[in-house]
Structure formats: C-alpha cells, structure tokens
Image (cartoon, grey):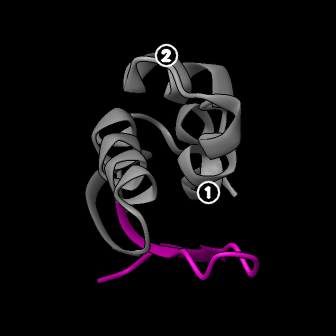
C-alpha cells in the first residue's frame, strides 16, 4: 500500500528520485525510493529515507536542507543541488 508518493528531477543533469511512503497511525512506517543519478544524489536519497522513517508526516516534510547537508557531512557548493534533490 502506498499512501504518499513523489518524484523530483534535475533537468540540467538528469538526476531523478522517487519516493513511496506508507503511513500508519500518522507515522512513516515504510519508505521505498529509487534514485537514478550521481552518487551524491543517491546517497542523499538514501539518507533522507533513513531520516524520515518513523517520523510523523509533518516532521518528515519539515526536514530542512541544512539537516540533510549536515547529515551528509557537508557539501561543496558545486554539488549542493545534487545533495538537495531528494527534498524537492
């Protein structure tokens, strides 16, 4: 069962990620994703899935770019768009 889903892409480089979430009792109970692109966007997509698992939908949606970049250990400006693609 899929309760929420979304897809984001970067037309300039072709990176793309998609998510499917199952929500039980207001919490993200299962999350599936696919990421097609550079290693940075793939790593960020996987990390975002880990960060939102078990959170309320509201809290998951409030994940900030700063939080994701911090969890990634930082990112050079040139690759920032790659790292933040999963949040779009």
Quadrant position of the N terminus in the picture: bottom left
**Relative to 30, 12 lies left or right:** right
Instruction: Give the farthest residue toward the right.
Output: 12
Quadrant position of residue 83: top right
The residue positioned 68% from the left and 41% from the top of the image is 78
**Relative to 46, 78 lies left or right:** right
**Relative to 46, 52 lies left or right:** right
Q: Is 21 covered by the magenta stretch? A: yes
- Mark 1 lies on residue: 85
Magenta residue span: 1-22
| Residue 58 drawn above or below residue 17 | above
Q: Position of residue 39 (x, y in %)?
A: 34, 57
Q: Nearer the viewer, residue 56 or 14?
A: 14
| Residue 20 drawn above or below residue 72 | below
Numbered disc 2: secondary structure: helix
The residue positioned 53% from the left and 39% from the top of the image is 60
Q: Nearer the viewer, residue 14 or 1?
A: 14
Q: Position of residue 43 (x, y in %)?
A: 32, 49
| Residue 88 drawn above or below residue 83 | below
Quadrant position of the C terminus in the picture: bottom right
Which badge, 2 or 1, comes first in the chain's sequence? 2
Mark 1: give few (<14), some (14-19) or many (20+) Cα within 10 Å. many
For the image shown, how many numbered marks are present on the structure? 2
- Mark 2 lies on residue: 70
Q: Is 11 covered by the magenta stretch? A: yes
Separation (CA) of disc 2 from disc 1: 15 Å
């Amino acid at each position: 069962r899929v309760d929420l889903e979304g897809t984001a892409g970067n037309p300039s480089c072709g990176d793309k990620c998609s998510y499917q979430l199952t929500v039980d009792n207001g919490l993200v109970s299962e999350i599936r994703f696919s990421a097609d692109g550079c290693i940075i966007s793939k790593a960020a997509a996987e990390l975002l899935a880990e960060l939102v698992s078990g959170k309320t939908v509201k809290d998951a949606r409030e994940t900030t770019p700063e939080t994701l970049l911090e969890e990634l250990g930082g990112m050079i400006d040139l690759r920032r768009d790659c790292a933040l693609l999963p949040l779009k």
